[in-house]
Image (spheres, rainbow, N blue to C red):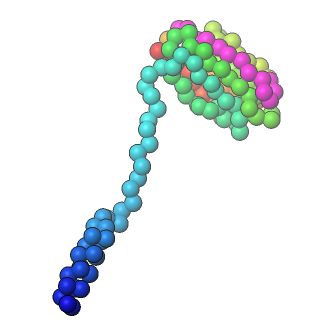
Amino acid sequence: MRSRFMIATFALAAACGGGGSDTPTIPTIPSAPDNPVATTAVSLQGDAFNPTHILVGPSAVVTFTNNDRIAHNVMFANQNITSITDWTSGDRTTTMPSTPGTYSYTCTIHPGMSGTVKVQ
């Protein structure tokens, strides 16, 4: 009887033992798509553009929205894209860059606040 109990105890311990490692599993984070999009939104909030860098196709619609309580602007280095001057919370505008290239923009009110639109 005692040997049956011991065998059952060892079998139960082996079944519940886990047998895994103590190393935690790190979840895989999907990367951003490499395909250009036709429409995208950029939020201005907390002294940052979000997303900072976007990839779009030709004539894509890019909407910039000031979701902050303070004034911002969007000034493009390329003079062929209309810059957006001082606007307040809730203001939004769209632009449609058509020529392939990388277009840098900044908020001149808040140094360090910058981003890019890459048109493929």
Q: Is residue 17 magenta?
A: no
Quarter of the image for residue 83 reads top right
Give the answer, above or below, for where 25 lies relative to 84. below
Q: Main secondary structure of the magenta part?
A: loop
Q: Which residue is pictured at 69% across the width and 12% down the height?
A: 82
Q: Which residue is pictured at 24% across the width and 86% down the height?
A: 5
Residue 111 x/y as whole percent: 70, 33
Compared across the picture, whether 74 is left or right of 70 comes to left
Pick the front one: 15 or 46: 15
Compared across the picture, whether 61 is left or right of 27 comes to right
Q: Which residue is pictured at 43% across the width and 38% down the height?
A: 30
Compared across the picture, whether 63 is left or right of 90 comes to left
Pick the front one: 77 or 72: 72
Quarter of the image for residue 39 reads top right
Q: Is residue 89 magenta?
A: yes
Quadrant into which the N terminus falls: bottom left
Pick the front one: 32 or 6: 6
What span is in magenta? 87-99
